[in-house]
């Protein structure tokens, strides 16, 4: 399992989810929305692949 991320990508993500108002330093709502959106995109791609395989 690859759990490493390149420093440039890491910094880009950190900038997007950062929040000075949060005690933990990130905007939890924005973070969850990004995660859910990415999961939906993965699900959509998987469904397209499954349909292609079923043909």
Image: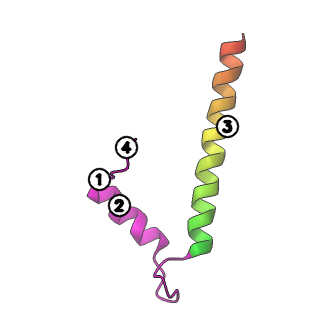
Quarter assignment of residue 18: bottom left
Q: Earlier in the sequence, mark 1 or mark 3?
A: 1
The alpha-carbon separation of the residues under discs 4 and 3 comes to 22 Å
Disc 4 element: loop
CB contact under 8 Å: marks 2 and 1: yes
Q: Position of residue 46 (x, y in %)?
A: 64, 31
Residue located 58% across and 50% down the image: 38
Which residue in the protein does label 2 denote? 10
Q: Position of residue 53 (x, y in %)?
A: 66, 14
Q: Verify whether residue 8 appears in magenta.
A: yes
Front disc: 1 or 4: 4
Q: Earlier in the sequence, mark 2 or mark 4?
A: 4
Disc 2 element: helix
Q: Residues in magenta?
A: 1-27
The alpha-carbon separation of the residues under discs 1 and 4 comes to 11 Å
Quarter assignment of residue 34: bottom right
Mark number for residue 2?
Answer: 4
Residue located 58% across and 74% down the image: 28
Crowdedness near tag 3: few (<14), some (14–19) or many (≥20) residues, C-alpha within 10 Å: few
Q: Position of residue 32 (x, y in %)?
A: 61, 65
Q: Earlier in the sequence, mark 4 or mark 3?
A: 4
Residue located 40% across and 41% down the image: 1
Q: Verify whether residue 20 appears in magenta.
A: yes
Q: Earlier in the sequence, mark 2 or mark 3?
A: 2
Disc 3 element: helix
Which residue in the protein does label 3 denote? 44
The alpha-carbon separation of the residues under discs 2 and 3 comes to 25 Å
Q: Relative to 42, does residue 55 appear above or below in the rendering? A: above
């Amino acid at each position: 399992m690859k759990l490493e991320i390149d420093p440039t990508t890491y910094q880009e993500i950190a900038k997007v989810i950062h929040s000075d108002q949060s005690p933990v330093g990130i905007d939890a709502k924005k973070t969850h929305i990004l995660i859910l959106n990415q999961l939906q995109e993965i699900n959509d791609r998987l469904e397209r692949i499954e349909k292609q395989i079923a043909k």
